[in-house]
Amino acid sequence: MQPDWIMGLLGGLIIGLAGAVYLLGNGRIMGASGIIGGAVDGSDRTAERLTFLAGLFGAPALLALVVGAPDTRVTSDIAVLVAAGLLVGIGTRIANGCTSGHGVCGISRLSLRGIVATVFYILAGGLTVTVFRHVLGVI
Amino acid sequence: MRSLVSLLAGSLFGIGLLLSGMTDTVKVQGWLDVFGDWDPTLAFVMGGAIIPMAIAWQVARVLRRPLAGDRFPPAPGAEVDRMIVIGSVLFGMGWGLAGLCPGPAVASLSYGGTGGLIFALAMVAGMWLAPRLRARLDRAVPAE
């Protein structure tokens, strides 16, 4: 495998290409939380959302069969997983976006809302890791 | 046609997430861990993703309409409301706790084990709850 930063850059370029395809093809902003949340609500454009999610789930599943599944090293602490999942689900819907919609798609068009969102979720994430890892020692 | 575009975009997104290392929760938490063993990978992923996306926004200004759609998204609003800040802080806390955000959570479902599945189910429950909580927040603390 290549060094981490090269794989990060390559993977990032492919993620950006995905967003470009979604924008120029369907005229939509590629935001994972909006696409999943819309599917949960059952609002309009259901076919578009479900096919996107099919690709998002299926393509890495196939790639993992070919090149081997990467280690996700997800915590086994169920309380942490449930709390984190609820926070991510509630937070991204209240903020109307996550790393892909506000981060990648928002910053690339210099959207003030996207930039502010990104600053706050990175600050909150950094503070959370610092407190829960170095102060409390639970993650 | 729109569904084909979605399938292609979703597939590329998932492949990019897997290859970039962003489905590895330790790498994501490592990027947020500025006082520990800091891992810069996520910055390369973000930077890499913004390049094609920035070009796409410029192309969208030249094209009159999307290839399989009616119109492009409207210009972003200039207003930063409190929901952006409150929501992003909550999201960031969850992101830091588990090292997963919505895209990677779905992309890694097939190989993320039980833990990844529990996170994804809780996330979906949170997304279902959010509109209800948001209505309550609006009533409890009116914006103005």
Image (spheres, helix red, strand yellow):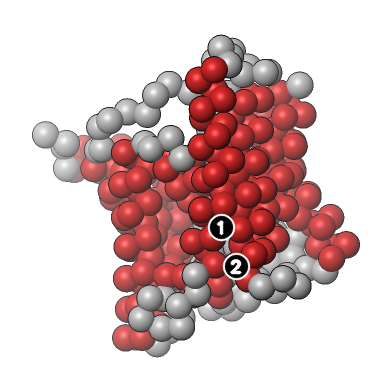
The residue lying toward the viewer, choosing from B122 and A51, is: A51
Label 2 packing within 10 angstroms: few (<14), some (14-19), many (20+):
some
Name the residue that disc number 2 marks. Answer: A5
Q: Residue at x 66, y 25 (%)?
A: A25
Q: Chain of mark 1?
A: B
Task: Please state which of the two labelled residues, at mark 1 or mark 2, is closer to the viewer.
Answer: 2
Q: Quadrant of residue B69?
A: top right
* Mark sitting on residue B45: 1
The C terminus of chain B, quarter of image: top left
Amino acid type of the residue that numbered disc 2 sits on in the rendered structure = Trp
Can residue A53 be seen in the rendering of this structure?
no
Amino acid type of the residue that numbered disc 1 sits on in the rendered structure = Val
Residue extending farthest to the left is B144
Q: Is residue B98 above or below residue B16?
A: below
Q: Chain of mark 2?
A: A
Q: Residue at x 70, y 33 (%)?
A: B6
The residue lying toward the viewer, choosing from A56 and A1, is: A1
Can residue A131 be seen in the rendering of this structure?
yes
Q: SS for tag 2?
A: helix
Q: Is residue B100 above or below residue A49?
A: below
Q: Are marks 1 and 2 on the same chain?
A: no
Q: Is residue B32 above or below residue B70?
A: below
The residue lying toward the viewer, choosing from B96 and A85, is: B96
Label 1 packing within 10 angstroms: few (<14), some (14-19), many (20+):
many
Q: Is residue A79 above or below residue B2?
A: below
The N terminus of chain B, quarter of image: top right
Residue extending farthest to the right is A66
Measured as percent of width and height from the top left, residue B73 is found at 48, 23
Measured as percent of width and height from the top left, residue B118 is found at 60, 64
Q: Is residue B131 left or right of residue B106?
A: left
